[in-house]
Amino acid sequence: MAPPVHITFLGGLGEIGRNCAVLESEGSLLLIDCGLMFPDTDMLGVDLVLPDFTWLLERSDDIEGAVLTHGHEDHIGALSYLLREASFPLFGTELTLGLARGRIEEAGLLGRTEFVTVADGERWEIGPFEAEFIPATHSVPQGVATAFHTSQGTILHSGDFKIDLTPVDGRLTDLGRIGSIADNEGIRLLLCDSTNADQPGHSRSETSVGKVLYNLMHEQEGRRVITACFASHVHRIQQLADAAIAFDRVVAPLGRSMKRNITMARELGLLTIPDSSLIDIEQVDRYEPGQVMVLCTGSQGEPMSALTLLSANENRWLKLTPQDTVIFSSHPIPGNENAVTKVIDNLFRLGAEVIHSGLSDVHATGHAKSEELKLYHSIVKPEWFVPVHGEYHHLVAHTRVAETMGTPPDRIVLAEDGDRLVLDDDGLRLAGRVPAEYIYVHGTVGDVGTGVLRDHRILADDCVVAVIVCVDRSARRIVAGPEIASRGWIHEPESGELLTDLSDRIRKAVEKGLADGADLGGLQRAARRATGGFVSERTRRRPMVVPVVLEP
Ligand SMILES: [Zn+2]
Ligand SMILES: [Zn+2]
């Protein structure tokens, strides 16, 4: 009997985000991705959600490495947490590793890992596994599918992908190689992206978006244009920049990750924007509105992102006016709809025009829709199938696609986070469960502020201050509070006085926000800033602040 292979899912099966799976053979572990999830708006005070690493950390010495399929946060964003507790090398393409590196460096963990650059078509031996990297088109360049050649045959992990026949960089999903593996050695198990399994038809090609953007830029002649997309979507950035430059606009990147990624992608030769067409946001006022395009982060309504701050009129260099058009070159990820809608409302309040994917074809998904999945299944012809990367209903929709394409229902395993499967000579089946809770991270995060990410464990040994204020925004006044609760901050007799002073400080900050017409997010940020500033000034502590601003 050949040694069995176990597959344990720590995240990504039941939500879009925190993708993380672990392959195991002969006592060795190999991670496939290690991502985070952005919280729903109802997770107050939570900035990030991580996979539960409890089980993995009991075996941290057995980790041979992590294969990273591409550079999205839902696949690489949790590495800067896991690497605090475990040390292992990372395997990925040049851009994927470049994107992963930023967070790891910020967390001071470069010494805990090694970056191993892999190229398309290469095979790498990692412990008892052999990983083969196969090009895949997606909404970030240099994504891969990975064929793991194991003692139990080939396990194909699709990565996030679509079948784009005219991608911006001409690098196609290598269906030929996948077909060749399928026809020769056969594919024992397919793990495949389910994000768009319930969507009919084919996804649009990324290059089709470029034409739409060009026409839009034409229509916006004389107006200032602010565009937002994912900072890692290098091909979208290229097409936005091309459209701007075609109409003699300069490009002003806004947001830390946007600036950083543009610099990196230009260095790697993945993005072409001439020096003469790039300006600093500080210089934006020197240009006529019709001569500039601002390219910013925050297309998902992320709380501290460039666009959210712009919509709250909180950017130092740029104030929006009715002269401005904001283009969301994006589509809200499930769970982010409310946050995006709030940003759009606030942009309209400032008088700006807003164009989003509901109005115009300014976005194309990076995930295969059902017809593409059918094509993929017809080529892979897997013996066993597990849908991954999706909410539960996406996974269910994907099982139907697989059945349509001839995989018998008893060869499909609908697994969830925490499930541990075994693949052996008898086939694939459930072999147990491991912890898979949502692990919440609090603390300042995003494009502004240098806030080092701090995780939930700080709760146990550091300083937490929670602030609750109830406001009436239409009357522009505080109805109740601020209520302050703290743990690990003050025990001294003078605490009564400190709390009164802090309460005054918060009240003033929130009242100022109310007078300026800030929304709840803006008020929350004001309360957070006032509290953090006060606590560090008066007691030299760096608290975790959990601000909650409510309306009755
Ligand atoms: Zn993903
Ligand atoms: Zn992705």
Image (cartoon, helix red, strand yellow):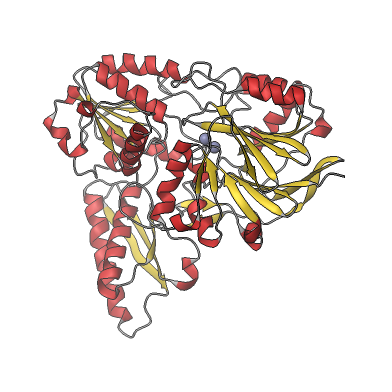
Q: Is residue 303 left or right of residue 293?
A: right
The residue lying toward the viewer, choosing from 338 and 415, is 415
Could one spot residue 479 in this view of the protein?
yes
Q: Is residue 412 above or below residue 47?
A: above
Res 45 seen here = no
Image quadrant where residue 15 sits:
top right
Image-quadrant location for residue 148: top right
Task: State which quadrant residue 120 falls in.
Answer: top right
- Name the side, left or right, on which 297 lies relative to 23: left
Residue 48 versus residue 155 in the image, above or below: below
Q: Nearer the viewer, residue 103 or 201?
A: 103
In this view of the protein, which residue sits in the foreground, 114 or 33?
Answer: 114
- Residue 366 place in picture, x, y as percent: 51, 27
Q: Where is residue 17 in the image (x, y as percent from the top left)?
A: 55, 43
Left or right position of 19 against 402: left
Furthest toward the bottom, the residue is: 493
> In which quadrant of the rendered image does the N terminus lie?
top right
Q: Residue at x 53, y 20 (%)?
A: 164
Position of 176 relative to 493 (above/below): above
Q: Residue at x 73, y 55 (%)?
A: 27
Q: Residue at x 25, y 52 (%)?
A: 513
How far across and down, in percent of the image, does residue 320 sit?
Answer: 22, 34
Residue 287 position, x and y percent, is 14, 28
Q: Could you tell me which residue is drawn at 29 percent across and 69 percent down?
A: 536
